[in-house]
Amino acid sequence: MLLPAILAVFGVILYPLGRTLLISLFEVTSAVAVDTPFVGLGNYIEALSANGFWGALGRTLYFTLVSTSIELVFGLGIAFLLNAKIRGRWILRALVVLPWAVPTIVNAAMWKGIYNAQYGALNGVLSHLGVIDSYQAWLSDPTTALNLVIIADAWKTTPLVAIFLLAGLTSIPSELTEAAKVDRAGAFRRFFSITLPLLLPSVALVLVLRTVEAVKVFDIIYAMTRGGPANGTQTISYYTYVTAFSEQNYGLGSAISFLVLIIILVLTTAYLRMLRRSEMSTL
């Protein structure tokens, strides 16, 4: 009965992982290479000693931290709004999902147009308000470009975070909040004493999912900036893509992929421990 599922997992997950691990131990510089010398951990040592790897990793961690923080803050606010007892909130719940439903490539193209130096909406609005005197090439500065890509990514994924947090809010018994109101507890006291502790499992789940996706971010980078300018938006996944496919160094690219996997496992383990602690504290 379990054999079909086992075969599917092996074919889709385990075999590619094993194959990638095997390639990372050899010097593979072509997709059709016959002579592939065994280098052992040489690719891993080369990756860890490259400045490009650490630069891409630093930008990835910055991207992950900032985007996840933005999504949590705005997602929580949207979740509270959608959970409020107001008329027509079902319409709001339907509308808030729309940004998340937009394909990533379409979202990237839309925001790239907004940031366009000649006809972008951002330049038009800021110029009309008198904030800027002339149109700016927003994606030409490495630091500015990375932050603008984060905004584009957060705009798409914040609704998903809001839906997860909304599910957590609806599971909190209303009797607890009502009892706190009877005891004259203010809004902040109710939030930090009741809502936030009971919402921590949902927050931890969101952190796990969004951290994994942020560390792996590739498509929006590829569509908006191609890692530029001056590698200012080159995340670790895009760095792996360039190494493996543009430079055709498949062995080194596979090694970098496994290093990324280790980073994701470490972060996920830390979040899961936090989730267990929060569950134990609420028992």
Image (cartoon, rainbow, N blue to C red):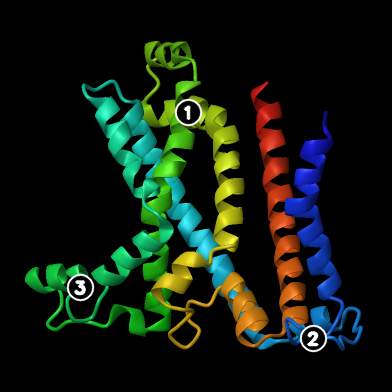
Q: Are marks 2 and 1 in contact (CB under 8 Å)?
A: no
Q: Position of residue 64 (x, y in %)?
A: 54, 61
Q: Amino acid at mark 1?
A: Ala
**Label 1 sits on residue:** 167
Q: Earlier in the sequence, mark 2 or mark 1?
A: 2
- Left or right relative to 164: residue 237: right
Numbered mark located on residue 120 in the image: 3
Q: Image quarter for residue 8?
A: top right
**Residue occupying the point 42% across, 77% down:** 225
Looking at the figure, which quarter contains the N terminus? top right
Q: Earlier in the sequence, mark 3 or mark 2?
A: 2
Q: Position of residue 258 (x, y in %)?
A: 76, 67
**Residue occupying the point 55% across, 51% down:** 210
Q: Nearer the viewer, residue 280 or 82?
A: 82
Alpha carbon distance from label 2 to label 1: 51 Å
Q: Earlier in the sequence, mark 1 or mark 3?
A: 3
Q: Where 160 falls versus 63 (above or below)?
A: above
Looking at the figure, which quarter contains the C terminus? top right
**Residue occupying the point 43% across, 85% down:** 229
Tell how many labels. Answer: 3
Q: Nearer the viewer, residue 151 or 276?
A: 151
Query: Regarding mark 2 in the picture, which secondary structure is present there?
Result: loop
In this view, the mark in front (2 or 1): 2
**Label 2 sits on residue:** 33
Specify few, some or many for label 1: CA neighbours under 10 Å numbering under 14, 14-19, or 20 or more: some
Q: Amino acid at mark 3?
A: Gly
Specify few, some or many for label 3: CA neighbours under 10 Å numbering under 14, 14-19, or 20 or more: some
Q: Amino acid at mark 2?
A: Ala
Alpha carbon distance from label 1 to label 3: 37 Å
- Left or right relative to 225: residue 216: right
Query: Regarding mark 1 in the picture, which secondary structure is present there?
Result: helix
Q: Nearer the viewer, residue 71 or 41?
A: 41
